[in-house]
Amino acid sequence: MPTSLARQPDDAQAGEPFAFFAPDEAGYRPLWLAQSSWSAEQAHGVAVSGLLAHAAEQAVVVHGRREELRPARWSVDLFRPVRMTPCTTRAEVLRSGGRLLLVDVVLEQDGEPVARASATFLKPTENAPGRTWAPDLERPAAPPVEVAPPTTDPHVPFFRSGGEWSQRFKEHQNAGQHSQWTTVPTVVDGQPRTPFVAAAAAADGANLVANWGADGVQHINADLTLTLVREPEGVSLGLTVIDRLEVDGVVVATVAVCDRRGPLGSVVVTGLSNLRRAIDFAGVRVGEEGRTEPGA
């Protein structure tokens, strides 16, 4: 989740576009909305994954195959902090076959790679007729429309942690099973929010729903892998943690992804304990209109 949505920009930032990045002559310039809660000098993973996905999708468009292919896998490695300084992306189509296309993307700052991603796009066909096993379980779903009305406008995320959905952060600082519902902001100013880019950006929120506990968020993810059986319908998505293991400060978590239509995929994240920069959401208060207010 871009926790920058839970705070207001300062006077210098208020005039910036409401997007994670702005294009410039050198590539892209991070805006205040991309600023991480881990550090004011670092961009959060939602923005980074979204920018990499934008570059990957544009490569498929240039290759002339975006209309016939569907994104099925998106993997991101966050191996260096992405600073709040200008950056560039470099995308390469590695394989373009009859039923699939593979593309790699690198994000660079000062000529050095800081993050990378790979995508698999597949050509849809018909379902196979044979019966196969599927788990008999209740799938995570979007919050009721009376709680979170359908919108394309970005908003402070809604959360659920065993009780009711709300935007009140303090209610969800607990060890319950966490869910999130969010509408993804524009990734690159002046560029449309496509469903794939929105899903790729939202996928980094898996770290939050998987690792938000009674003492805040004490883990940072080193990667994410999003898998999709279909593209989202729109730019609002839900995430629910469905499995989590931790040994010696290393976490592997699986998060289900849905939209208003229903389930559409999952995210797997690996993370590391990050106790020196744990994020405490107990003091964040959001008013009825989604604006932050002083006090807890």
Image: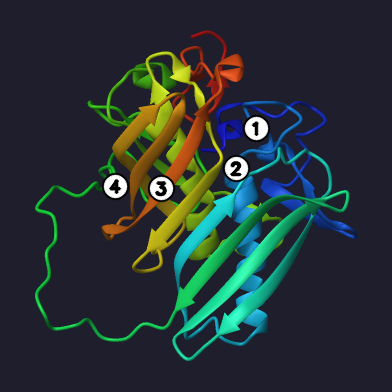
Q: Which residue is mark 3?
A: 268
Q: Quadrant of residue 53?
A: bottom right
Mark 3 or mark 4, which has the lower sequence index?
4
Mark 1 or mark 3, which has the lower sequence index?
1
The numbered mark at residue 142 is 4
Q: Is residue 138 above or below residue 56?
A: above
Mark 4 or mark 1, which has the lower sequence index?
1
The numbered mark at residue 36 is 1
Q: Is residue 284 above or below residue 111?
A: above
| Type of amino acid at the residue the image marks with label 4 | Ala
Query: How far apart are the two marked residues, 1 and 3, measured between alpha carbons?
Result: 21 Å
The numbered mark at residue 45 is 2
Which residue is rendered at x = 28% and y = 24% of the image? 176
| Type of amino acid at the residue the image marks with label 2 | Gly
Q: Residue furthest bottom?
A: 98
| Residues under numbered marks 1 and 2 in contact, where contact means CB atoms less than 8 Å apart | yes
Image coordinates of residue 210 in percent, x first then y, are 38, 34
Seen in the image, is 290 located left or right of residue 92?
A: left
Image coordinates of residue 152 in percent, x first then y, are 48, 54
| Residues under numbered marks 2 and 3 in contact, where contact means CB atoms less than 8 Å apart | no
Of residue 42 and residue 120, the one placed in the foreground of this image is: 120
| Type of amino acid at the residue the image marks with label 1 | Ser
| Residues under numbered marks 3 and 4 in contact, where contact means CB atoms less than 8 Å apart | no
| Residues under numbered marks 4 and 1 in contact, where contact means CB atoms less than 8 Å apart | no
- Of badges 1 and 3, nearer the viewer stands 3
For label 1, count other residues whose C-alpha is less than 10 Å away and answer few (under 14), some (14-19) or many (20+). Answer: many
Q: Quadrant of residue 104?
A: bottom right
Of residue 237 and residue 95, the one placed in the foreground of this image is: 95
Of residue 119 and residue 164, the one placed in the foreground of this image is: 119
Query: How far apart are the two marked residues, 4 and 1, measured between alpha carbons?
Result: 26 Å
- Of badges 2 and 4, nearer the viewer stands 2
For label 4, count other residues whose C-alpha is less than 10 Å away and answer few (under 14), some (14-19) or many (20+). Answer: many
